[in-house]
Amino acid sequence: MLKENEEININNLLSQLDDITAVDLALLLSDLEDEDIQEICFKLSDKELASILEESEEKTQIKILDLLRNNRIINVLSYMSKDDIVDILGEINIGKSKELIKLMKDGKDKKIIEQLLGYKDDVAGGLMTTEYIALKKDLTVSEAILKIKEIISKSEVIETIFITNHKKIIGITNLRDILIAPDNTKLEDITNTNFISVEPETDQEEVALLASKYDLNVIPVVNKNNILLGIITIDDIIDVIQEEQTEDVLRMAGVDKEENIDSSVMQSVRMRLPWLIVNLATAFLASLTIKVFEGIIAQVVALSAIMSIVTGMGGNAGTQTVSIIIRNIAIGKVELKDAFRLVIKEIFLGLINGAVIGLLTGIIVSIIYGNSYLGIIIFLAMIGNLIISGICGILVPLVLVKLKLDPALASSIFLTTATDVLGFFLFLSLAQLFLPKLI
Amino acid sequence: MLKENEEININNLLSQLDDITAVDLALLLSDLEDEDIQEICFKLSDKELASILEESEEKTQIKILDLLRNNRIINVLSYMSKDDIVDILGEINIGKSKELIKLMKDGKDKKIIEQLLGYKDDVAGGLMTTEYIALKKDLTVSEAILKIKEIISKSEVIETIFITNHKKIIGITNLRDILIAPDNTKLEDITNTNFISVEPETDQEEVALLASKYDLNVIPVVNKNNILLGIITIDDIIDVIQEEQTEDVLRMAGVDKEENIDSSVMQSVRMRLPWLIVNLATAFLASLTIKVFEGIIAQVVALSAIMSIVTGMGGNAGTQTVSIIIRNIAIGKVELKDAFRLVIKEIFLGLINGAVIGLLTGIIVSIIYGNSYLGIIIFLAMIGNLIISGICGILVPLVLVKLKLDPALASSIFLTTATDVLGFFLFLSLAQLFLPKLI
């Protein structure tokens, strides 16, 4: 493996091709110029190139495929598993993808690929591969072992073996159980009929949840008649888990999942600006709330300096609540029916945290401005705004889920609007009430 | 599988014990009273109870173990894999854990468990199990198959087989390759000597990164002399990935990873309050910045309503940048050496986004307040603050990493301080400059 910060020297690289793993070479290729990539691809066998393509990021895959002749691509693809072929065909432009499919040898493989291409890439059907071992239930163990040896080299998963009856899946068994069972045992006698499966339309997020809940290494995908269509393997499930979690983190911050550190300035502008404009609307709402109270601020200008403490702390406390709820929604642990219990808890939490923070702030403000009424106002406003932030922190994401919207995307905007507008309103209304004591 | 929102009826449950998966039963047990748990544990065999313990959360495990007699625990543990036994012994109180170890039969297993207990639970040694298949390099394939059949039932992983020479690991091979190789092939001829391993002290985050980068289902843990100590399996790696990502999301929001939706109000207060107090310091810094300019605000009270738009947008834009950087740090794609390039990009980004947002805001403010100089001020301040937020969004997390601090935990606090303090300062300084035009 090359050291990461070693300068990439193309001649060095060419001489070391045998010692580099496909993963590392795929990473290196992403940084190279077209002509260097071509020189490397020229040196590699079709099989080697296939494993590098499998490990490359989308951008690099497209770059490599653009440089290769269609006939070589067909040969390279023949070494790849069908789910990876389908992923690649889905990425390149439709014209080229159709040309390639035309060039493929007619037969079962081509038919399967065309069928897999029909699924969206974020559902079970788009994740599945057809390289599995399925055996008929009335085979004996010794017959099964012969059969397994025959197909094992073409299968992505060998540990889990699917048992079928007239093409319908009836259960799963384990290579381990087959190897230790007496030779004449029927497969159906060592079949576990209690297994988890998904349909091709199942969302990838649900597939990942099932896999992590039940510690599954592989999940069969079946149609409504229980006919085995394909399997989803653990490596693809890990990718889904990482993809979904990254998406959640970025969405909470208003960032498109397509943006990465290599995006150009204009790409980043296009992806970030819309979110900032949405936030600008929120900021104006808060600003207009303050404007309503300008008369009071003109009389007690100190209010302008301390009011943002109340809204800022409300935002911080609300973000804590929202983050916990969104994580628990993501792992399926919270639903709308839990709302009441959670809101009650957040009210007490807001009361206690608000009282502590409010007391601290109130004392400091009283000392700085020499007016204890300012301290009392901020104490009360802080408690109020922290309770508001707790209630909104629970209800906003749960209601968004109920409305089939993504809580990670939209929660923060509604939360900030609530804590800013209500926070300013609460604080400045209290100031109005106590106005004679403040002047 | 029971429906999730079905009321738990203990008699129903007892009559359906055979049909429930261990995972689901483990979930149900977590909600039951002690006496119901006892009744269920009484009905279950030691082996069944072992698989339920393996699937339970820490809280439930401790609850169950508290209800069982030590002798039954020992019998139950004997059905569990050693990494799970070690996890459980690490959770219960030290006194009980020592009693249990004393009760265990002396021998190899006990020695291994004591050794595993010596590792912290967030390093490779704490994740590993010793149930693997290792074979000597000069066995023939047919000898290997006999050996495999003997130990296969005690191994957690059967697909990957480790090849040793005088106890040192020299490579890995695959059950698939063994099954299809001719009978008299030597194992060393089908051994892949180019494999990834970790040491017992390797941080779990690095283990997860390696597994996901190289699509590994299992990683061997070796000591400095290349002697195989144990293996880390994919199910534990998935748990690590989820744990680390959840930790990052929660830390960014100032939430302790130990907090969950079942934490009591006082537990939540204890975990969230310190973060709020840290944020309070930031809020006061911003407040004092405004206080410095009170004289100007007294003359142009409109400033108090519009200044928070500048700081708010700076915070939003900075959060976008920070989120992208933190995700890329987590997957090992960004380091301090990339800082210069990224900062340059963020400056252009801040310039463009700031100009668009600033222009919009400036026009609206000019119309509302009938003063185009207010518009010009906010336009300039917005560009300035979005550039500041971009620079800080890159530098803060990268510097924190360099200082060996967690960027997810501390980035937001430094970022907000910068965008608030500098944002208010920039806007109000500009207002001071243009003061004659504003009155």
Image (cartoon, coloured by chain):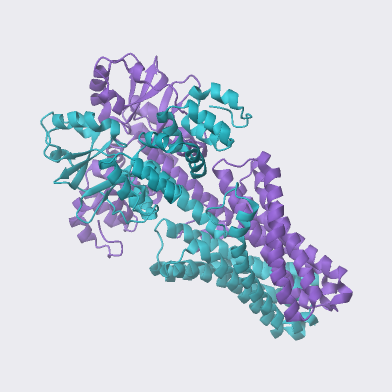
Chain colours: A cyan, B purple
Q: Position of residue A321 (x, y in %)?
A: 53, 63
Residue B207 position (above or below residue B20): above
Out of B262 and A406, give the one closest to the viewer.
A406
The answer to whether residue A57 is left or right of residue B103 is right
The quarter in which the C terminus of chain B is drawn is bottom right
Which residue is depicted at the point 79% across and 81% down?
A: A298
Establish if A31 lies above or below B292: above
In the figure, is residue B188 to the left or right of A55? left
View extreme (right): residue: B436
Residue in front for this viewpoint, A387 or A419: A419
Which quarter shows the N terminus of chain B? bottom left
Residue at image location 75% in from the left, 77% down from the top:
B366
Q: Position of residue A268 (x, y in %)?
A: 61, 55
Task: Please indicate, yes or no, whether residue A32 appears anywhere in the rendered image.
Answer: yes
* x and y percentages locating residue B383 in the rendered image: 74, 62
Residue placed most toward the observer, B342 or A193: B342
Asked if residue A233 shows in the view, the reply is: no
**Corner quadrant of residue B401:** top right
In front of the other: A201 or A378 = A201
User: Picture coordinates of residue B347 (x, y %)?
Assistant: 72, 53
In this rendering, the count of numbered labels is: 0
The residue at 39%/31% (across/down) is B113
Instruction: Say if B205 sits above or below B172 in the image.
Output: below
The picture quadrant where one finds residue A233 is top left
Q: In which quarter of the image is residue B154?
A: top left
